[in-house]
Image (cartoon, grey):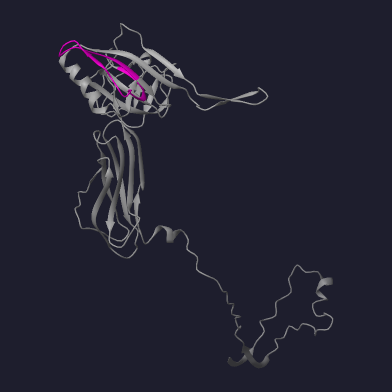
Amino acid sequence: MAIFDGNLLPGIASPQHPGASASLSQFAAGVSGYPGASAQSVMLFGPQTLDPIQEIPLLYGGTLEPMTGSELFEKIIVTPREKKLGFVLSTNLFSVDVWNTFRETLRTMVRIDIAGGGGTLIDNPFGVPLVFGAMQSRQFQATVPQDGDAQIQNTVVFVFTGISGTDLLVTGTRITVFSPDPDWTEPIMERTEYLTEIMNAYADKEQRVQLRTNPRTRLRYKVLTLDVRDTAALHALLWGWQGRIYGVPFWPDAQLLLANANIGATVIQVDTTLRKFVADGLMMLWRDMHTVEALSIQTVAAGSITLTAPTTQAWAADGRTYVVPLLTGRLPDEVGVLRMNNAVAELEAEFECEVV
């Protein structure tokens, strides 16, 4: 505690305000219990003491709880962790981001492992071993080709020594478009199948339960090929894919393309009124059985279709390009082809289409 000696001098007495009335001035020296104010300064003597304020310490008990930072940092994050491709109609490309969220240390990727079937490929232009700096991320290109196993089930692991959770799961189903157009001299038969269960009570009452939200569709039509190239393509479609899922064109709803679609187009101009074009469904652009591109639908408007991925070919609205909705279906276990000669073949195609 510090002690200082000194004098306390009052300031000069304030003069009377010129605007104060005489009746108020008489009270300047008369406050009960205190000596009257004096115009003469008074000197006071004595020690002055400065006492510091003593702070009262407060102690709290608790535990350290992890927050967002502990979930984000000090690990390797792969984005996305799962890629669902759905129906694979053509080659699929997508980016994979690998991020080292360790804030102060380097991490090294020693290799990339790919397990399972499906043919997924990872393009690594950086090579291995690959050093990731603190908080550094890198992007890799993943490719799922159009051709390969019917079911895609690949697990991709970006291997960092001593670190887990760096895997990517890729799933999907490949389908091939059954692109031969029907023989229009005969009609296309469409059969709609509903499924209802009838439960009978002992009192002869019954209850009907709908077991299928949407009806199942069966399509049957004749295919006729008249040259060697078309006949060879028909045989390749049958013997190379017969036990798998086809993209089945719903030919009664085929519509002409109304405006040119350039490479990279995401909007197709077509009349969709009362047609089987549906959001999250499939469609194809078709000129002949060898010139076809299948695409996934994002949204459907009255005069256009928005795609989930851009087109890879250019399509002219010249009266020969058709936009056709696609169903997914299977051929029966046995398929008979009538061969007139090596250039002419006839097939009675019947597809059991899956519920959309």
User: Is residue 173 rendered to the left or right of residue 128?
Assistant: right
Q: Residue furthest front?
A: 202
Main secondary-structure element of the magenta-colored stretch: strand
Could you say where residue 202 lies in the image, as x and y percent from the top left?
A: 66, 26
Q: Say if 101 sits above or below 259 in the image.
A: below
81 and 118: which is toward the camera: 118
User: Is residue 184 rendered to the left or right of residue 50?
Assistant: left
Figure label count: 0
232 and 104: which is toward the camera: 232
Which quadrant does the C terminus fall into? top left
Picture residue at 80% right of the left edge, 83% below the top? 36
Could you say where residue 196 lies in the image, as x and y percent from the top left?
A: 53, 24
Residue 105 falls in image quadrant: bottom left
Q: Examine the structure image and report whether residue 338 is included in the region drawn in magenta.
A: yes
Q: Examine the structure image and report whether residue 164 is included in the region drawn in magenta.
A: no
Could you say where residue 178 lies in the image, as x and y percent from the top left?
A: 29, 22
349 and 292: which is toward the camera: 349
Q: Say if 27 sits above or below 82 in the image.
A: below
Which quadrant does the N terminus fall into? bottom right
Could you say where residue 89 lies in the image, as x and y percent from the top left?
A: 30, 30
254 and 343: which is toward the camera: 343
Residue 13 falls in image quadrant: bottom right
User: Which stretch did the figure color magenta?
Assistant: 322-350
Q: Is residue 314 visible?
A: no
Q: Say if 27 sits above or below 130 in the image.
A: below
Q: Is residue 222 visible?
A: yes
